[in-house]
Amino acid sequence: MDDHATEAEFEQLLRGADLRVTRPRLAVLRAVRRHPHADTGSVLAAVRTEEPTVSHQAVYDVLGALADSGLVRRIQPAGSVARYELRVGDNHHHVVCRSCGVVADVDCAVGVRPCLDASDTHGFVIDEAEVTYWGLCPDCSTSTTSDHRS
Amino acid sequence: MDDHATEAEFEQLLRGADLRVTRPRLAVLRAVRRHPHADTGSVLAAVRTEEPTVSHQAVYDVLGALADSGLVRRIQPAGSVARYELRVGDNHHHVVCRSCGVVADVDCAVGVRPCLDASDTHGFVIDEAEVTYWGLCPDCSTSTTSDHRS
DNA sequence: GCCTTTTCTTGAACGGGTCAAGTTATCTGC
DNA sequence: GCAGATAACTTGACCCGTTCAAGAAAAGGC
């Protein structure tokens, strides 16, 4: 992997968002890039493989700051904890497995801004339409017992 | 309100789902009908105005059982606790206010099963497409400070 | 290099939701 | 109607993701 190049990109991203460049932040960005849709705990674990001293609070803070500046996207399907991904600004959506909870990316077939024209918005000013597909992942749909969520 | 009629309907619904008819369950159904998109705490409070002795655990159990049988629908926008509604099976969606969190119903303009044809589903067997619109409610979009979420 | 401000560490606390054991109530069959 | 079987409810403890608060550390501007 050309980590030097992306490392510099991450720095650019942070500076562009008026965020200081710190080791925890770079480590979080690397972790989210390596583990798309990872929850906070997984990000923390991944970060600590490179930066063992980073606190869990730092990871919460960093993920919050990155999400606020739009550098990462936070998703949270019903019944799941918060998950994060680097893919941002391309209006893609997610499939969630009802059985094991795994998440995958889906490009919406309709186009760039699908379903954004709701029929009656009750006076809401809408800026985003988020689509979540629910179903069973390949593994869970072929297994004999179809539901083994804890 | 013609509560006798709907009371009988609620009984039918429960029996039809192989659920015993109990006072807590009827009270929860009434509460959800009266307070669409209410969270568990609000449902509990509403239930206790009629059945003061109902435990919080009972409300969790009842809402879970009703949701599992499809008598109520559970929604959980990112950053929100679980919310419940009686409107079921009509494939409607929700607008959520980014500022105050209020939820409103939206009939999708596209049709009965919008966006259900995802471009590449990675082998998932999809059974539902859930659309969440994000924006500002009328109150929050007209107030001077546009963001006062706690 | 120094100063200001942001960021991180430490450690406690919060709250929605769940677990578990025992009691109560609903329904079925007589 | 009544008794037994089983589903549902009460009580109370507990879990865990997330947040709060205070002080220490480090990044960036001068």
Image: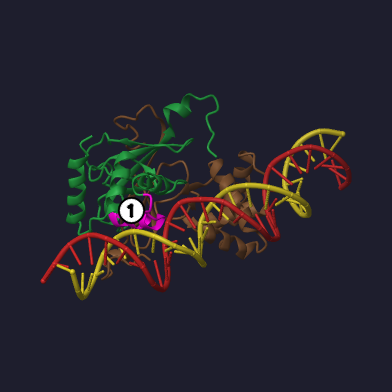
Chain colours: A green, B brown, C yellow, D red
Does any portion of residue B92 appear in the rendered image? Answer: yes
At a point 61% along the width and 49% down the height, the residue shown is B61
Disc 1 residue crowd, few under 14, some 14–19, many 20+, Cα 10 Å:
many
At a point 37% along the width and 63% down the height, the residue shown is B100
| Quarter containing the N terminus of chain A | top left
Left or right of B117 in this view: B67: right
User: Residue B89 at x, y = what percent?
Assistant: 46, 41
**Does A61 appear in magenta?**
yes
Q: Which residue is mark 1?
A: A63
Secondary structure state at the residue bearing disc 1 = helix
- Tell me which segment is drawn in magenta: A52-67
User: Residue A24 at x, y = what percent?
Assistant: 31, 53
Does any portion of residue A121 appear in the rendered image? Answer: no
| Quarter containing the C terminus of chain A | top right
Observer-nearest of C20 and D23:
D23
Tell which subunit mark 1 falls on.
Answer: A
Observer-nearest of C2 and B64:
C2
